[in-house]
Image (cartoon, rainbow, N blue to C red):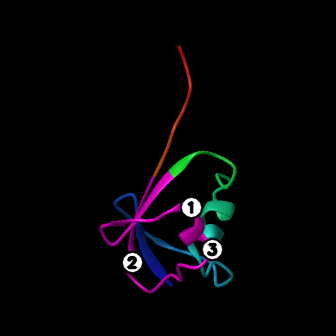
Amino acid sequence: MEIVLNGELIQIPDHVVFISDVLKHYEIQDKVVVVEVNGEILTRLEHQSTRLSDKDRIEIVHFVGGG
């Protein structure tokens, strides 16, 4: 399946089915993130229940500390 992730068209593995799987695949599941799918911001609870579809547009923003 192909998705657009942060503006880049990518092929994702077959085992990546839900938004939570995308976060695990990129090893950011434990970080504070904001996820938008096709223009709609998801709650953290929706990450596990939102199923991906071919050509979905996903934006993921995670916060980085610094000083």
The structure residue drawn at horizontal position 30% and vertical position 67%, both measured from the top left corner, is 39
Residue placed under numbered mark 2 in the picture: 56
State the count of labels. Answer: 3
The residue at the far left in this view is: 39
Residue 67 vertical placement versus 36 (above, below):
above
Precedes in sequence: disc 2 or disc 1: 1
5 sits left or right of 29 in the view? left
Q: Distance between the residues labelled 2 and 3?
A: 16 Å
Q: Distance between the residues labelled 1 and 3?
A: 8 Å
The structure residue drawn at horizontal position 65% and vertical position 71%, both measured from the top left corner, is 21
Precedes in sequence: disc 2 or disc 3: 3
Residue range highlighted in magenta: 34-60
Q: Position of residue 57 (x, y in %)?
A: 36, 71
- The three-letter code of the residue at mark 2 reads Asp
Q: Which mark is residue 48?
A: 3
59 sits left or right of 63 in the view? left
- The three-letter code of the residue at mark 1 reads Arg
Residue placed under numbered mark 1 in the picture: 44
Disc 2 secondary structure class: loop
Could you say which is closer to the camera, residue 4 or residue 24?
24
Residue 23 vertical placement versus 38 (above, below):
above
Marks 2, 1: nearer the viewer: 1
